[in-house]
Image (spheres, grey):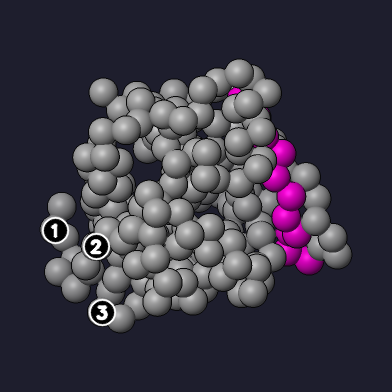
């Protein structure tokens, strides 16, 4: 598959992400308003959320840029530096978290999908995690939606097949609850998220 020569992919660590936070926040809002998240984004919240990564010295962000525009991003940090919803789940299940790296999200604007960009981003992210030599597993989570959800677009393709190809295994017993406001809602509601993990060896 021919690569888009105008798209550049780079790896950022810790405070290196600070200049990119507004662009990454805007990208997240665009992507997460789509199914299955249907998230009603807010720039102030997004920028505050992304500060988690700028403050974690071992955080890794891979961004894809088309000229000056951020078109995709993968975020990750040690699980022990992640959100309380994630840490508390692993603690409750008595799963040692100090050797797990948490992949927060992988997002790519719709018009750039199907061009191998997402795969290139992920490979660069995984390489950066492996090079640290500190982690036994990478963990990520995805929102659980009913198969018959009427809001699901006819052409919707879940990322599950992508995760399986990268060696991830779903752990149905690992489910954390996250809260966010869906588009058109007046208040935040609970959304269960199921975890996937892969070995780093």
- 79 with respect to 36 (left or right): left
Front residue of 116/67: it is 67
Which mark's residue is nearer the viewer, 1 or 2?
Answer: 2
Q: Choose the circle earlier in sequence order: 1 or 2.
A: 1
Is residue 29 visible in the rendered image? The answer is no
Q: Is residue 174 above or below residue 14?
A: above
The residue tagged 1 is 2
Task: In the rendered structure, find residue 40 and report the number of the disc placed on it.
Answer: none
Residue at x 26% of width, y 39% of height: 132
The question of residue 180 being in magenta is answered with: yes
Query: How far apart are labels 2 and 3 at the CA level?
Result: 11 Å
The residue tagged 2 is 9
Front residue of 171/113: it is 171
Q: Choose the circle earlier in sequence order: 2 or 3.
A: 2
Q: Where is residue 102 in the image (x, y as percent from the top left)?
A: 46, 40
Front residue of 19/153: it is 19
Is the residue marked by circle 3 packed among few (<14), some (14-19), or many (20+) residues within 10 Å?
few
Is the residue marked by circle 1 packed among few (<14), some (14-19), or many (20+) residues within 10 Å?
few
The residue tagged 3 is 67
């Amino acid at each position: 598959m021919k690569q888009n020569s105008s798209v550049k992919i780079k790896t950022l660590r810790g405070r290196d992400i600070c200049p990119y936070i507004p662009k990454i926040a805007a990208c997240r809002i665009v992507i997460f308003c789509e199914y299955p998240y249907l998230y009603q984004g807010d720039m102030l919240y997004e920028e505050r959320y992304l500060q988690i990564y700028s403050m974690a010295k071992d955080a890794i962000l891979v961004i894809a840029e088309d000229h000056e525009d951020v078109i995709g991003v993968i975020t990750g940090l040690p699980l022990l530096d992640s959100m309380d919803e994630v840490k508390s789940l692993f603690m409750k299940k008595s799963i040692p978290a100090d050797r797990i790296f948490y992949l927060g999200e992988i997002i790519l604007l719709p018009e750039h999908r199907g061009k191998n960009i997402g795969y290139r981003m992920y490979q660069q992210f995984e390489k950066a995690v492996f090079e640290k030599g500190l982690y036994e597993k990478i963990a990520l989570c995805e929102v659980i939606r009913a198969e018959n959800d009427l809001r699901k677009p006819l052409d919707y393709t879940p990322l599950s097949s992508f995760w399986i190809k990268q060696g991830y295994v779903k752990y149905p017993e690992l489910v954390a609850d996250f809260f966010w406001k869906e588009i058109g809602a007046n208040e935040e509601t609970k959304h269960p998220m199921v975890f996937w993990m892969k070995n780093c060896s």
